Amino acid sequence: MLPPLRLGIAGLGTVGVGVVKIIRQKANLLADRTGRPIVITAISARTRDKDRGVPLTDYAWEDDPVALAKRDDIDVFVELMGGSDGPAKAATETALANGKDVVTANKALLALHGQALAEAAESADQVIRFEAAVAGGIPVVKALTEGLAGNDITRVMGVMNGTCNYILTRMQSAGLAYDEVFEEANQLGYLEADPNLDVGGIDAGHKLALLSAIAFGTKVDFKGVELEGIQRITIDDINQAADMGYRIKLLGVAQMTGRGLEQRMSPCLVPDSSPLGQLEGGTNMVVLEGDQVGQIVLRGAGAGEGPTASAVMSDIIDIARGIRVPTFGKPAKGLAQATSAKASASAPYYLRFQLLDKPGALAKIAASLGQAGISIDRMRQYSHEADAAPVLIVTHKTTRDALEAALAAFAETNVLAAEPVAIRIEAV
Ligand SMILES: NC(=O)c1ccc[n+]([C@@H]2O[C@H](COP(=O)([O-])OP(=O)(O)OC[C@H]3O[C@@H](n4cnc5c(N)ncnc54)[C@H](OP(=O)(O)O)[C@@H]3O)[C@@H](O)[C@H]2O)c1
């Protein structure tokens, strides 16, 4: 049997404790599968004497994760603290500089500093693995980096923030307003300390940026992700989209276009009969499309102790087996600078507006669409509430530029009672 693989684990919260449990409970299975014992040598967290529900006295303790990252008796630094900067970044850099491989679940760190860290890892002849950073327990990094490595990837899509999917599906099933379900999610502990990371699409945007880098061989470009959160989605949008056969999802889409890399994380309508449309609650789904394989759909738990620790273990097991792949699937210096392209591919759109009860009002809206070159696929008008009536239009495929021109023209018509809502309908 090979010598043990020695781990230093920084961060003993939900994920860290999950990893400690697997290593303690499945020692024989892990050794059988890798041909060597996997052991924890040292640990670090903020508070030493916290009961974490798992015995920790066998392991050396470090108050400072950077000191942990330097220890001679660890081979792999497992970063499970979180945060894009601060101790997570400092300790990861220290670990690489001190000849350790790194396993992390930290999407924020890699979305913002992934290129520099990948280059540092390669210069030091070490690896960084991050399966748990994207879609929790779903092995999507491995699928893209290894399983689909023989494909040109044409598109990556996904629902990658369970909290947003919980909020949207709960609004629909319980008929509740956004604010009510947001508060419910908060009470249940589903939201990050800064909820905007979830509902503003930032957390999911980090994940999409990481997948794009692997899929398209480009440097991680989080700034290039067009972000829009779910805060403006109303129960009316959800109900009326359902009436037209759609569900609203916070959907990430990345594709390489003639004009550059398009990455967007925004609310989209998807057909309610599609796999993405049927996705309920906190579950995640990632759809990968390759030129040879066609479409692959991966679905599973995007967060939580067991699923996330399962993903961390897959990286640790790879390292124990001697499997060493570049961070983003090809040498970091060979990753291209992405030219970010605003969503250009044409798509149908869902439009919802409150039409004032005035003669010729609808004709003015139709004319605005016509002048922008947009034709109407379907339209529905609901009965008047006070002096306005809700109207829904599903357009035929059009470009964002044309849509924006039409929305600007709407504003000049003086027949709308409120700002119109426009949501892209994604072909999935
Ligand atoms: N939870 C999930 O389902 C999930 C899913 C996917 C990815 N992730 C990622 O996994 C990472 C960990 O998430 P988590 O949910 O396990 O977080 P968590 O429960 O908040 O735990 C964070 C841990 O890091 C420790 N820590 C924080 N700052 C530290 C510092 N300066 N020095 C030493 N230790 C420090 C904390 O110590 P104390 O316990 O002493 O406070 C705690 O043990 C994050 O990057 C997160 O984005 C989480």
Image (spheres, helix red, strand yellow):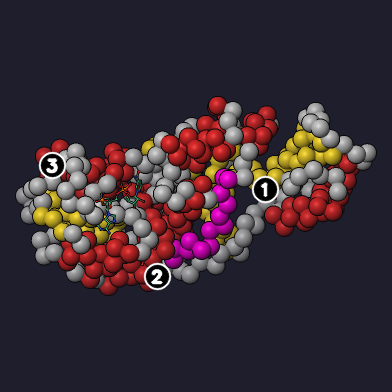
**Membership of 224 in magenta stretch:** yes
The mark lying in front, picked from 3 and 1, is 3
Which badge, 3 or 2, is on the more N-terminal residue? 3
Mark 2 lies on residue: 334
Counting from the top left corner in percent of width and height, residue 382 is at: 78, 30
Circle 1: residue type: Ala
Amino acid type assigned to the residue bearing label 2 in the image: Gly
Mark 1 or mark 2: whose residue is earlier in sequence:
2
Q: Which residue is mark 1?
A: 347
Q: Is residue 369 left or right of residue 49?
A: right
Q: What residue lies at 41% left-to-right and 35% top-to-bottom?
A: 188
Is residue 142 shown above or below 332?
above
Q: Quadrant of the C terminus?
A: top right
Horizontal and vertical percent position of residue 75: 15, 60
Q: Is mark 3 within 8 Å of ligand 1?
A: no
- Is residue 229 shown to the viewer in this render? yes
Mark 3 and mark 1 lie on one chain; the one further toward the N terminus is 3
**Residue located 23% across and 71% down the image:** 97
Q: Amino acid at mark 3?
A: Pro
Circle 3 is placed at which residue position?
55
Mark 2 element type: helix
Near mark 1 (Cα within 10 A), the count class, few <14, some 14-19 or many ≥20, is some
